[in-house]
Image (cartoon, rainbow, N blue to C red):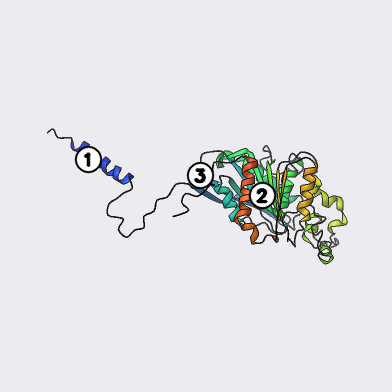
Amino acid sequence: MKKLPLLLTGGLLLAGMASCVNAGELAGNTEGAQVIRVEKTRGRIDALNDIVYSQVKSTVAVRQLHMSLLVPRNGDLKPAIIYFPGGGFTSAAWNKFIEMRMALAAAGFVVAAAEYRTVPDTFPAPVIDGKAAVRYLREHAAEYGIDPSRIGVLGDSAGGYMAQMLALTNGDKTFERGDNLAQSSDVQAAATLYGISNLLNIGEGFPQAIQKVHQSPAVTEALLVHGSAFRDWPGATIDSDPQKALAASPMGHISGKKPPFLIMHGSADTLVSPVQSQQLYRALKKEGNPADYVLLAGAEHGDDSWYQKPVIERVVNWFKATLGAPKAAATAEKDKNANL
């Protein structure tokens, strides 16, 4: 019998061993083990943190504004969602609502979470920042695998105000300042959860004692519009200049064609009146714009109701229907691994 060269013999032996390894069945390693098999239904999601998207001058110093990103690891161009956190116009901690952001990323969206200037900075600083965040994503769309023609915004409470303002001021150059000005800040969809649509009547329908609080010059909506009392300036109530307050409100920018809206509010909200969402919905429909209004029965302002699966799925599915379903990083249908 003709002998094979040693190198060839070794190669065949290694190939045979590799085929056994690739089969995933190494003998002698299963004793005592609970062997499971999984379907590859979930892709990887990369988390990118502390990205500086803008540098601005605030009332106290020059500061950097940050965002974080969740980026599904696939080669397709993906729609993007920018989440703006609530905080009563006094804070904007962009690490909130991870449950919602992860669900969107798992569905295949690139998900940004962005901070913005708050009181003592005054309007229009937050809106300027929000538009800068949109422009940043468009400028870096290729880097993050984003389809720049499909960018939506999402926010809760004061973040809902942000989402509304950005969508309702598409094409308005008043708020375009800073970097990446060659890029558009227009958005193609907006979802607002228990958001503020009119700074003049946040407490409408509440007891008079609560409504009276909103007439103080120290309440945050008044500080946002008029600034803080200082030296000879005593401050001003929100209704001391209704025209100025309305110009700083989403309801002051309602006319004309607008992108689709998802408007959600809790029926038991005692902080931001459900009237805020109702009046936004009616105004959008009156102008002939697409809008869905969902009232969450018994839900308070930002309580645990908003973190439940039906609520999160409602938001995810709405964005998929509105912006176009991305290639999912995790299968949205029945999980084939659910019974493991």
Comparing 242 with 205, the one in front is 205
Helix, strand or loop at label 1? It is helix
Amino acid type at image mark 2: Leu
x 61%, y 57%: residue = 308
Mark nearer the viewer, 1 or 2: 2
Residue 104 % position (x, y): 59, 48
**Is residue 170 left or right of 6 when viewed as pictured?**
right
Tell me the quadrant of the picture where the N terminus can be found.
Answer: top left
Comparing 42 with 46, the one in front is 42
- Disc marking residue 154: 2
Helix, strand or loop at label 2? It is strand
Residue 250 % position (x, y): 77, 48
Amino acid type at image mark 3: Arg
Which sits earlier in the primary sequence, circle 1 or circle 2?
A: 1
**Is residue 98 left or right of 218 when viewed as pictured?**
left
Whole-angstrom CA distance, mark 2 to mark 3, is: 22 Å
Which sits earlier in the primary sequence, circle 2 or circle 3?
A: 3
Disc 1 designates what residue? 10
Helix, strand or loop at label 3? It is loop
**Is residue 78 left or right of 26 when viewed as pictured?**
right
x 79%, y 39%: residue = 256
Which sits earlier in the primary sequence, circle 3 or circle 1?
A: 1
Whole-angstrom CA distance, mark 3 to mark 1, is: 38 Å
For the question of whether residue 52 can be seen, the reply is no
Q: Residues within 10 Å of mark 1 (few under 14, many from 20)?
A: few
Disc 3 designates what residue? 73
x 61%, y 51%: residue = 313
Residue 309 % position (x, y): 59, 55
Tell me the quadrant of the picture where the C terminus can be found.
Answer: bottom left
